[in-house]
Structures are given as structure tokens and as C-alpha cells.
Amino acid sequence: MAGCSFAVPRGTICGLIGPNGSGKTTTFNLLTGLAKPDGGAVLYRGEDIAGMKPYQVFRRGITRTFQITRIFREMTVLENMLSVTGLAAAERIARARADELLALVNLTHLRAEYGGRLSYGQQKLLEFARALMTDPDVILLDEPAAGINRTLLQHLLDHIHRLHEQGKTIVIVEHDMNVIMNHCERIFVMDYGVKIAEGPPAAIQGDERVIEAYFGRRRAAADVGR
Amino acid sequence: MARHEHIRNLVLLGMAGLALAVLPHGLSIYFRSFALFTMMYVVLALSWNVISGFTGYTSFGHVAFYGIGAYTCAILVTDYRWHWLSTLGVAAALAALGALALGYPVLRLKGPYFAIAMLGAAEGTRVIVTVWDSLTHGGLGISLPSAETSLETYYAMLALMLVTAAVAYAVGHSRFGIRLNAIREDEVAAEALGIDATRYKLAAFVLSAVFPAMAGGIQAYKVLYIDPPSVFFIQITIAMALMSMLGGKGTVIGPILGAVVLYSVQEATWVNFPTAHLIAYGLFIVLVARFLPRGLMGLAIDRGWVRKGMVH
């Protein structure tokens, strides 16, 4: 990445798109402490969190999911939920929250099952629910639509909108353009580690540089949103 | 797990303790020793399990702490006339400090590198103890004076085993334990959920060091002669690991079961053929890895006799 600059307005749903290798996941890694920038800053509520350790970033209210789900396979669904820190000391409060979230994603009946035995879609939901245990303010979702069916995706999008209504800030990295164009208020486009475009869906769809990045120079009037 | 289940388990532990407390009066010296060493291996296996089973940092050098404990006790009793029980506190403290100092650099290593580093640490400790003969009597070893019947050390080991089991239980069924498991499963994801892995690993490591140290101290006072090779014996590390794995590492009952089973089998079969020891252990390792990768407890869980997970 080189000379990238973003500003994510609070309380919005933003999309981060770009061809493979453009630096989207790297951006998430830089935001959450999994990678250290050589220069620049990551400002959150006036504080520069660049270079902080992941657990410190998490405790400030920023959470993320991963491109390939990273649930704890040899632990039960409930244990996955309870592994999160920063909750009230009383275990019953944590459990209540876990049960609430598991009910939300329809995984209650699997709370005693090993995470590794869940289907891919269920694992994604588990990772999503787990990320919400501490009621974070910022939620970064790395390809939430990948590998799941339409019905499940719709459930996920409903949850995302519900979070949005609660005032959360959400950034979604996605390749599924339907998701991005129909659900994001603002879109950032990256290519080769640089931000090449930024704006609402309508502006991005017609943007020449975006079309070029995805489809190459020769493609004329290819509507990225279709 | 509901509160009443915890209470029930504690009561069971207490009853086992009582039974074991009454036991030695009816046993010959040989069987008292057998019981003592079985309990010792329970302590070692449970402790090893905290860092290697729960946290996933497989240690091939835990015998270092055992050896430190043995030597602490032996030196203080023989050269400084301490009462042997009070040396155990010092042994635990030294092991804790050692674990902190060693753990900080070594826990940054992953998987096999950590295992080998621990192996190196154990060997290094053995060499230091051998060379520092002004303190440790070096290769000559230390002969301890004794005034005890075999009962004192038996009860000390019993008490140590009960405490270790209670601590392992508390760790295993708590959110602290869940977080150790999370570190084992996926340290990156664990960090992303707010777990300060460095701190948790160090805590687990220190916890896993203090009980073997005390076990080593009691053992020294029991056998009344120690020297570097007998105390920093690789077989002890292998035994700890194998017992834990056989029983089911990552559980609480697993290491206890594994220790009892393996030590009993060992004493019943090849104890008279010391050369067969390592061969037998090797065979066991292969069998466990091939047929019981999750140990006896894993088998029980798969059959549905035991619930999945540690927190319900």
C-alpha cells in the first residue's frame, strides 16, 4: 500500500472494494493491529491506533471478521462466544449476551457442538456473532458474503442493517457487487495498494478508473454494478 | 457447568483425597511408594497439561522445573538444615521466577521451536546444576538426611496432588481456561478478540512450573539421594507428556487418568527392564498418536459418555 487515505464517517456502512491483491485485507490488518504501517496514522476518536497490538485495538471497540473464518474449531460454540474479553466480570452477564447473540443467528441449538463441526455458513455466522459480544462501535467485515447461499446472506445483511440502525460503523470488504452497491452508503475503491476512487454507489458504478481496474482498459461502458 | 456440578466435583475430589489419606496405613512400603509416585505423576501430567494441553505450547523441557525443585529441597535440607516442608515454598518461588524469566523469550516461539527451546532449557539447567558444584555438589549428587517415615512424604504428595487438581480444575472450567484454549486454537484470532496472549501464556507457564517443582522437592526427600542425571531425566518429560496425551490433553481428568494408567502399566510390566522403558514409551507414543489422538477422554467424548467442551 502506498499513500492511502480514507475517512470513514461514523455510523455509516462503507464498502471497500478492488481487484484481488489491491490491499483490502491489508488495510483491515493495518486498522486492527495485525500489521504495522511504515508511515502514517490510523486515527480513531482522535487517537492514533497504528501499531497497537490487536487486543488493544479490540478493547477500543473495533472488531473484525476474517476472510477465511477463524473460529476455534476444537472448542464449542458457546466457548467460542465466551472467549471474548472485555465483558462484564460476572459470567452470567457474558452468558446471557452469548445466548442472545446465538439466538439472533440461529445457532442456539448448536451451542454445545464443536466449532469445527459446523457448516461453513454456520461458522461464518458464529464468527459474526462472536465479534459482536462486546457491542463494538466499529465492525470490519472481510468478505462476509463469500461462500454462503443467498438466504443466509440476506440474514446477514439484515443483521448488518440492524447494527447500522443502532449507530454502529460498518466497513465491508466484498467482491459481491450486489452487496456493495445495494447496501453501502459510501464506497472506497483500491487498486495496487492505492485508493483510486471514493464516493456513493452511483458515482462508483460509472467511474472509469474503477471499471478499468476491474476489467481492463478496453472494456467500454461495463457497468460495475450489474 | 452449573454451580452444583462444581460442588459435586469438589466433593468427589475431597472423597478421593480422604480415601487416599486412609490408604497408606493398609499398604506395604512398596505400595506406599507406588501410590506416592502415581500421585506425583498426576501432578506432573496435570501441570504439563496447563501449558501444553490447554494453551497448546508443547513443552519438552518441563523436567527443568522438577529438577529445580528437587535441588532446592536437597540443598536447603542438607547444607542449611531447613525443614524439608519449608523448602517447598522456596522451590515453588524459584520455579515461578525461572518460568517468568524463561517464558518471556521462549513463548514467542511457536510449536516445534518452543518444544525444542524447552528441551534446550532443561538440558541447560542440568548442565548448570552439574557444573555449579559449590552449590549443588555437582556430579556427586546430594544425600539427604532423613528422619521421616514413608508417611510424611506420602501425605505431602497427596496434598500437592489435591491442590494441583483443584487448580487445574479451576483453570480448565473458567474463562481463563477458555482463553488459553483460544490461544491454542488460533492465537491471531484470540488476539483479535482482546486476549493479551503474552500475558495469558506467561501465566499458564508459571502455573505449570510451580507444582512440578514442589513435586521434585518432595521426591528428593523421599528417595534421599539425587544427582543431575536422575533428576533432569528426559524420561520424566516424556512421561508427563505421554500421560497427558494418553488421558486426553486439554481436559482435566485426562492427565489424571493417563498418569494412573501409564504408571500402573509401567510398574506392572517393564519396571524390571529399565532398558525397555524408552522403547515402551516410544511404542506408546506411536499407539496413542495413531489410535487415540485425543486420548481416552477424547474417546469418551466421541462415545457421548462425556460432554463436549469444558464450559457449558
Image: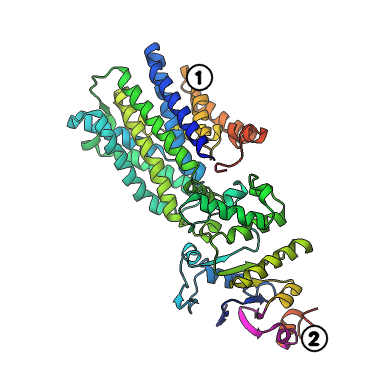
Image quadrant where one finds the C terminus of chain A: bottom right
Residues packed near mark 1 inside 10 Å, few (<14), some (14 to 19) or many (20 plus): few
> Magenta segment range?
A185-208
The residue drawn where x is 38% and y is 20% is B21
* Residue B59 seen by the camera: no
Which of B242/B28 is in front? B28
Query: Is residue A203 found left or right of A80 in the rendered image?
Result: right
Q: Which residue was labeled with disc 2? A: A218
Q: Is B235 located above or below residue A211 in the figure?
A: above
Q: What residue is at 20 percent from the left and 37 percent from the top?
A: B134
Picture quarter with the N terminus of chain A? bottom right
State yes or no: residue A191 in magenta.
yes
Badge 1: chain ID: B
Which color scheme does this rendered protein use?
rainbow
Where residue B172 sits in the image (x, y, percent)? Answer: 49, 41
Q: Horizontal and vertical percent for residue B32?
A: 39, 17
In the rendered image, residues at marks 1 and 2 fall on the same chain: no
Q: Tag 1: residue type? A: Trp
Name the residue located 62 percent from the left edge and 82 percent from the top edge: A195
Residue behind mark 1: B270
> Is residue B141 among the parts visible in the rendering?
yes
- On screen, B164 above or below A178? above
Residue B41 in the magenta stretch? The answer is no
